[in-house]
């Protein structure tokens, strides 16, 4: 058994952010998209990626004040879709993201480890206010 078989890795959420470069031709962008799907299918077949989905444009934000229609001006970047890498480290997952052919035309990728534990108010997490002490 190899090391990669013994430790297949953890899930890392990948958020596709941004928009295509305004000056890029539709032909060049379509080639990058086609190359993306070849890359995507290869990584899925190798067990290094789990498929996600593109996100549609309509948006609503649900808060304790109610439901607000988007898009939201406070969002500095557009999230266009998501998928998951299966990797042994954040560095390995980001190295996979860096191979994405669509980066050449303006898209960016946020890679975040998926937390295996349930949320707890007693443990610091991404939802914990910066001024709070846990």
Image (tube, grey):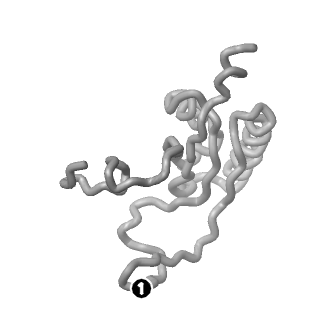
The residue that appears at 70% across and 44% down in the rendered structure is: 50
In the image shown, does 70 or 119 lie closer to the viewer? Answer: 119
Q: Is residue 132 above or below residue 7?
A: below
The image quarter in which residue 121 lies: bottom left
In the image shown, does 79 or 46 lie closer to the viewer? Answer: 46
The residue that appears at 81% across and 36% down in the rendered structure is: 45
Residue 124: x %, y % from top left? 32, 47
The residue that appears at 51% across and 55% down in the rendered structure is: 18
In the image shown, does 70 or 126 lie closer to the viewer? Answer: 126
Residue 54: x %, y % from top left? 66, 60
Asked if residue 53 can be seen in this view, the reply is yes
In the image shown, does 70 or 115 lie closer to the viewer? Answer: 115
- Report the side of 19 relative to 66 (left or right): right
- Report the side of 7 relative to 114 (left or right): right
The residue under label 1 is: 66
Quadrant showing the N terminus? top right
Residue 14: x %, y % from top left? 57, 47
Asked if residue 111 can be seen in this view, the reply is no
Give the crowd class for mark 1: few <14, some 14-19, many >=20 residues within 10 Å: few
The residue that appears at 54% across and 57% down in the rendered structure is: 19
Residue 12: x %, y % from top left? 56, 41
> What element does badge 1 sit on?
strand
- Report the side of 20 relative to 53 (left or right): left
Badge count: 1
């Amino acid at each position: 058994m190899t090391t990669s078989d013994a430790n297949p890795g953890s899930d890392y959420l990948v958020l596709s952010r941004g928009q295509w470069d305004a000056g890029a031709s539709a032909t060049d962008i379509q080639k990058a998209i086609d190359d993306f799907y070849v890359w995507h299918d290869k990584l899925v077949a190798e067990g290094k990626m789990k498929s996600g989905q593109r996100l549609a444009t309509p948006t609503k934000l649900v808060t304790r004040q109610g439901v607000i229609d988007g898009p939201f001006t406070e969002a500095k970047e557009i999230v266009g879709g998501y998928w998951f890498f299966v990797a042994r480290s954040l560095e390995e997952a980001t190295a996979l993201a860096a191979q994405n052919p669509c980066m050449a035309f303006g898209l960016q990728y946020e890679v975040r480890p998926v937390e295996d534990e349930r949320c707890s108010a007693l443990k610091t997490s991404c939802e914990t206010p910066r001024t709070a002490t846990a």
